[in-house]
Image: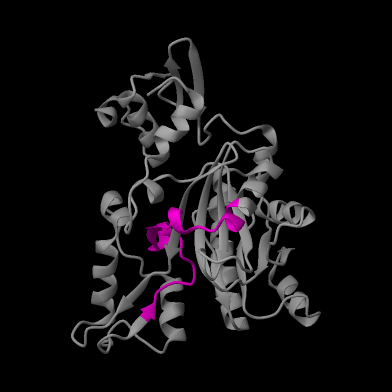
Amino acid sequence: MLKNKYPQITNNVIKSLLTEAKKNKIKVEQIDPHFLSFILRYKNKKHYIFSKKYGLNKVNGAIVSNKYLTSKALAKTGIKVPKAFLCQNISDVKKLLGRKKIKYPFVIKPFDYSLGVAVTANITDFEMVKMAFSRIKRYWQRSLKKNPKKHKNLFMVEEHVKGNDYRFLVLNNKVIAVTQRAYPEITGNGKDSVKSLITNYYHSLKYYQEKNKKPLFDKELKRNLKMQNVSLADILAKSKKIRLRQAANVFGGGIAINVTSKAHPFYKKAAIKAAQEFDMSIAGIDLMTKDISQKGDYRIIEINSFPALDMHENPDVGKPLNVSKLILKSIFPKIK
C-alpha cells in the first residue's frame, strides 16, 4: 500500500519506518513529493523525517559523514581506531610508504561516503594501489557531477584491520542490534565453474533478491580471484573456499548474521561511547574484532548517522529484529 502511495521512495530505511508507523496507527503525511520529507503524528506529538535523516541526531552528529575527521576525533577520546591519513594523489601514498607511516596491507577509500563505494581493502602491493586509485578517481567524477560545490579531491589511506566485521545499532545510549557482516565466499562442488558459483551465491542473498540486483563481476572481484590464483572459468574443487571481496559490506554481497545476544558488553560499551562522543541518539557503529563474544582487541572503523535497518530486520542468518518499531517508540513512547 505504501509503495503505491509514495512511489518515489526507494530508500529501504524510510520504507521500513513508514510501514511500521502505519502498523502502529501513527499518521504519516508527505510534505512534498519532490523531496523525501514526511511528518509523523501520534496523539499530540509530531516528528519530521527529511532526506536521509531520522531527525534524531544533533548537529554534532553531522561530522561522522567525514570519516577522516571521525577517526581523528575518536582517537582523541581513547577509542581504538585504525591509523588513517588523508591523501590527494597516488604520490602521497608513495610518500607514506617511503616514510614508513603506513605499511601493507592497508585500505584506500573515500573520506566522505558509505555503502562500501570505491573501498579497496587488504592492499598488498603497489599495483593494487593503482587499481584502488582508479576506483577513487571514478568516484570523484560521479561526486563532482552530483555536487560540484562540496566535492574535494581527497581520499583516505587506512590501516587494514584483520578480524570480523560487525555493525552495532545504537539508540539512545543502548545497543539494540548487532549484526555480523560475513565476507562473501563461495565453496566449490567439483562440478560448477567459479562464475556459476558466484552467480548462484548472489542470487541466494536476501538483499540481492529484494533489490533484484545483478551479481557483482567488477574489478574488486577480479582482484580477489587473481590473489587466489583462480579464474571465472575454473572448476572449483569440492569444499575449496574462495573469498570474493575484502570488504564484508552487505551491499557488496556480505552475509548478515544476527549476533546481538553474543556481543560482549565490552564492545557494546565502546560502541555507545563512540555514539555519545558526537551526541548521536541513533548511530550505526562499524567495529572490527576477532570474536564478538570475548573481550579483546578491536577497532572502530566508522560511524553512520543514517544506518541501514534491513540487515537487522531481515538477516540472512538468525532472528529478525524489528528495530523500526524501537526507533518509533523512542519518538512516540505511548505507542504499544
Quadrant position of residue 318: bottom left
User: Does residue 66 lie above or below 203 as drawn?
Assistant: above
Span shown in magenta: 242-268
- Picture coordinates of residue 83, whole percent (x, y): 72, 67
Q: Quadrant of the N terminus?
A: top left
Q: Residue at (70%, 56%) from the top-left corner?
A: 71
Left or right of 244: which side holds 45? right
Please report the residue visible at 59 percent of the width from the left and 36 percent of the height from the top: 281
| Residue located at (36% from left, 74% from top) | 185
Q: Is residue 285 left or right of residue 328?
A: right
Judge whether 11 appears above or below 118 on screen.
above
Q: How many marks?
A: 0
| Whole-percent x, y for residue 212 in the image | 27, 53
Q: Please provide percent x and percent y for residue 220.
A: 46, 72
Q: Residue furthest left?
A: 191
Choose between 215 and 278: the one closer to the eye: 278
Q: Nearer the viewer, residue 215 or 257?
A: 257
Residue 295: in magenta span: no
* Residue 53 located left or right of residue 1: right
Question: Furthest residue to the top?
Answer: 44
Can the viewer see residue 147? yes
Comparing 25 with 175, the one in front is 175
The image quarter containing residue 182 is: bottom left
Colour scheme in the image? one colour
Name the image quarter holding the C terminus: top left
Viewer-side residue, 324 vs 115? 324
